[in-house]
Image: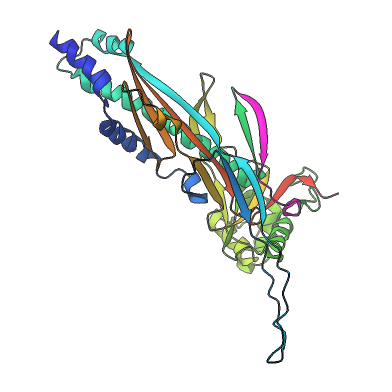
Amino acid sequence: MERHLSVYQALVGVPGNQGELQYMLDTVNSKYNNSLWRAFTEVLPASRSKKFSTIVEETGIVVKASVLGSMGKKPLRSVEGGQSYSDSIHKIGHGFKVDQSDLNAIEEMNLVNVDMAAEMVKKYINRANMIIGGFHATWNDWIFQGLSDQTIKLYNQGKLAYTIDLRTPAKNKLKASKAKWFAADGGYDIIGDLRKMSKRADDDDVNMSSDRVFVVAKSLYDKILADAGVIEAIKARMPLMNSTLAILTDNEILAGLRALGLPPMVAIDEKSRIEIDGVPTLDSAKFNENKVSLIPTSKLFNMHNSPSDYLKDQNPATVKTTFEGGLIGAIEIFGSDPIEVVTNMESWTFPSFKDPRKIVSLDTQAVES
């Protein structure tokens, strides 16, 4: 009897209070401190509103001061205001449970000198790990869609619900100049198209910082570094490597692209084990394999967020907390018939570009008309 009582308390009492729940979820979440979405995103202070408004400042144009007499009136300049657009913070979430079937499964193993309470806590932590990882997989998905397509597709139960346009100007969305990249009959110009992107980034209405990088999916990155035209263009600038027997390493090709005046190139290759409608699959992080984007090295995105509604719950039979800096809310609900602990999690979040003009993209499989 005493053994079963301790197991029950392990199940409903661990975490069982706000402090212990907070500690466990923070510990699990710390495994995702290197999630790639963080590299591109600044998390804004939480807002009570589920709507957000983004202000995009116009590019400043310096107007020369006029020569005036000592008592002359100064001319008033017409300065255009910022462009504003609004959107909604979206809710994402899921949950998990640990119940008496898990307890029975451990008991049926007839393990010797095993702390049942500790085993139940292990199960709880393992399931929390997968569930928390799912939030980071979604944020990665959103950020990589934004980087490659400048739109974010939202799905509900596996079906496309709607597409959010992140308002990047059409002039910043370029196409291949001569032919689709890697076309069988050739004629395409990878280096020329990359230069075209850099030139667009230098235009006054973009005015991108010189500290910039190309970002591409790993699959496209590998094709670029293996392309015969790219290699020949680099060899032409490297007389000692002009032999047909010479093989350039990836680092030599990347250095060669830099020598041609192009920014560095970064490959996006993050894959997560995810579940879609109960079916385990491998997530490709949704960076479009046909797109190249040129971006400044500063963080492009703002993550808008609103506090979890769980914090409003006054039911004393639940335990509430937040983690990931408040982005994720969690609530525990205890049941006795059957014995179970249900943990639900939610996040009211959505990213936007700080300035939609500070990105230039190229569709490698579309050609200028």
Q: Position of residue 141 (x, y in %)?
A: 56, 38
Height in image: 74 above or below 211? below
- Please indicate whether residue 16 sits to the left or right of residue 219 in the image: left
Height in image: 5 above or below 23? above
Rendered image quadrant of residue 206: bottom right
Q: Position of residue 296 (x, y in %)?
A: 58, 59
Height in image: 172 above or below 11? below
- Whether residue 217 is visible here, answered yes or no, is no
Toward the viewer: 170 or 355? 355
Q: Which residues are magenta?
A: 158-173
Toward the viewer: 66 or 62? 66
Which residue is depicted at the point 72% across and 61% down? 200
Q: Quadrant of the N terminus?
A: top left
90 part of magenta stretch: no
Q: How is the image coloured?
A: rainbow
- Please indicate whether residue 131 sits to the left or right of residue 59 in the image: left
* Residue with the most extreme bottom position: 70
Q: Position of residue 274 (x, y in %)?
A: 49, 28
